[in-house]
Image (tube, rainbow, N blue to C red):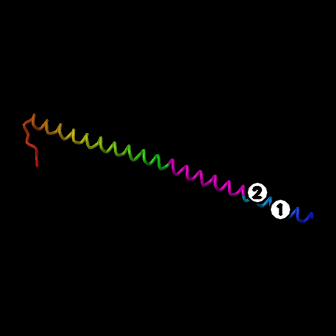
C-alpha cells in the first residue's frame, strides 16, 4: 500500500511540475505576443506619421515652386524649360 501511495505522490508531483512549466511557457508566449502587438502598434503610428510628413513635404515643395514662379514674374524672368 505504501508503494502505491509513494508512486501516486510521485505522479502528482510530476503532474504539478508539468503544469508549472506549461504555465511559465504560456507566460513567455503571452509576453512575446504582447510585445509583437506593441511593436505593430508603434509601426502603424510611425507609418501614419511618415505619411503625414511626406504630404507636408509635398505641400512645402509646391509652395516653394509657387514662390519661385512669383519671384520670376516679379523680376520679369522667364522660367527655363
Residue depicted at 24% across the width and 42% down the height? 61
Quadrant of the frame with the N terminus: bottom right
The residue nearer to you, when weighing 43 against 60, is 43
Is 67 magenta? The answer is no
Range of the magenta residues? 19-38
Question: Would residue 61 be found to the left or right of residue 52 on screen?
Answer: left
> What residue sits right under mark 2 in the picture?
16
The residue nearer to you, when weighing 80 against 21, is 21
Instruction: Name the spot of residue 55 as percent of width and height, x first.
Output: 30, 43
Q: CA distance from mark 2 to mark 1?
A: 10 Å
**Which residue is farthest right?**
1
Binning the other alpha carbons within 10 Å of mark 1 as few (below 14), some (14 to 19) or many (20 upward) gives few
The residue nearer to you, when weighing 22 against 48, is 22
Binning the other alpha carbons within 10 Å of mark 2 as few (below 14), some (14 to 19) or many (20 upward) gives few
Instruction: Name the spot of residue 15 as percent of width and height, x first.
Output: 76, 60
Q: Main secondary structure of the magenta part?
A: helix
Residue 2 appears in which quarter of the rendering?
Answer: bottom right
Disc 2 or 1, which lies upstream in sequence?
Answer: 1
Task: Decide: is 10 above or below 81.
Answer: below
> What residue sits right under mark 1 in the picture?
10
Amino acid at each position: 500500500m505504501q508503494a502505491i501511495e509513494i508512486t501516486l505522490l510521485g505522479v502528482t508531483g510530476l503532474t504539478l511540475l508539468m503544469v508549472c512549466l506549461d504555465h511559465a511557457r504560456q507566460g513567455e508566449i503571452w509576453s512575446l505576443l504582447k510585445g509583437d502587438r506593441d511593436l505593430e502598434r508603434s509601426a502603424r503610428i510611425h507609418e501614419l506619421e511618415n505619411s503625414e510628413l511626406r504630404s507636408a513635404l509635398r505641400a512645402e515643395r509646391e509652395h516653394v515652386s509657387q514662390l519661385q514662379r512669383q519671384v520670376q514674374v516679379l523680376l520679369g524672368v522667364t522660367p527655363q524649360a
